[in-house]
Image: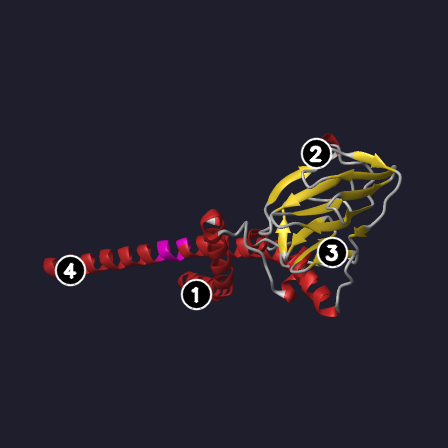
Amino acid sequence: MTHKRSHRKFRSLYIWHRYIGIAAALFVLILSITGIMLNHTGALKLDSSYVESDWLLDWYGIKAPENIKRYAINEHAVTQIGEQLYWNNKAVSGEYPALSGLLTFPRFSAIAVQGEIILITNQGEIIERLSGVQGVPSGLKRIGIQDNGTIVIESAHGYYLTDQDFLDWKESEHISNTVWSVESPLTATQLKQAVALFRNNELPMERVMLDLHSGRLLGSWGPVIMDIAAIMLVFLSVSGLTLWIRQVMRRRQRLLKKHHHTNTQENT
């Protein structure tokens, strides 16, 4: 009876080991694949690659701010979404206050924001960020250009003039013949593109892999599910070791029994 109960116990353990192993296989694959990818974040560029899948971005609750500004001159345009600037659909590094205007020149362009003027190449590389230290008036409201090429700034304290080098600033009371930079209304297509541009640069692949590895991708229940998976793996390790030890012991018992039977035959 004891042998039969032991046999049923180990048979039950084997069945549990098999089915839990099948159930845990998916988690083993997820943990293995994400773990390998996270170990090679730099080589795989996970920290500089961004998710563009709409359903995944929606799952994370990533939305573009409603206040979107755009200034466009000929083939060049600057768009502000939140505190991020985009030059011709290319993200400009850094965070910026309210966008106030745009001027373009043959070799570069000048983007006006509150308290700063950003000089940028046509390819979107920042040349220099000019602030109050370089003489940019505080409280910048808008930027324009006169017929003779003089640049005009309207600030909280009045009007200021400078040239394309942005080195010398002169206050002026009378402004005439100035073409001011005006905001360009976004069409429905441009608005959709701007929202996609913002969302597609907010969620790095590295974060998704980390959340998938830890289970946080599945919400508050995710870590609990991964904890259960970890317990399943512990069970598989213990049950697998137990079943292996039992097989080794049974094999040894059979060998001993065979050896004893052989010796008995030889003695008779």
Q: CA distance from mark 3 to mark 1?
A: 74 Å
* Mark 1 secondary-structure assignment: helix
Q: Residue furthest bottom?
A: 188
The colour scheme applied to this rendered structure is secondary structure
Image quarter of the C terminus: bottom left
What is the x, y in percent for residue 75?
65, 60
Q: Mark 2 highlights which residue?
A: 167
**How packed is label 1: few (under 14 Cα within 10 Å), some, or many (20 or more)?**
few
Task: Give the extent of the magenta segment.
Answer: 241-246
Kind of residue at badge 2: Leu
Cα–Cα span, label 4 and label 2: 106 Å
Mark 4 or 2: in front is 2
Asked where in the image residue 50 lies, by quadrant, the reply is bottom right
Nearer the camera: disc 2 or disc 3? 2
State which quadrant residue 217 falls in: bottom right
Number of the label disc, if any, that sits on residue 262: 4
Q: At x 48% / y 58%, what residue is drawn?
A: 28
Who comes first in sequence, dot 3 or dot 1? 1
Question: Separation of disc 1 and disc 2 at Cα?
Answer: 87 Å
Residue 93 percent coordinates (x, y): 63, 45
The nearer-to-camera label among 3 and 1 is: 3
SS class, disc 3: strand
Tell whether label 2 touches label 4 (CB within 8 Å).
no
Mark identifier at residue 71: 3
Residue at 62 percent of width and 47 percent of height: 108
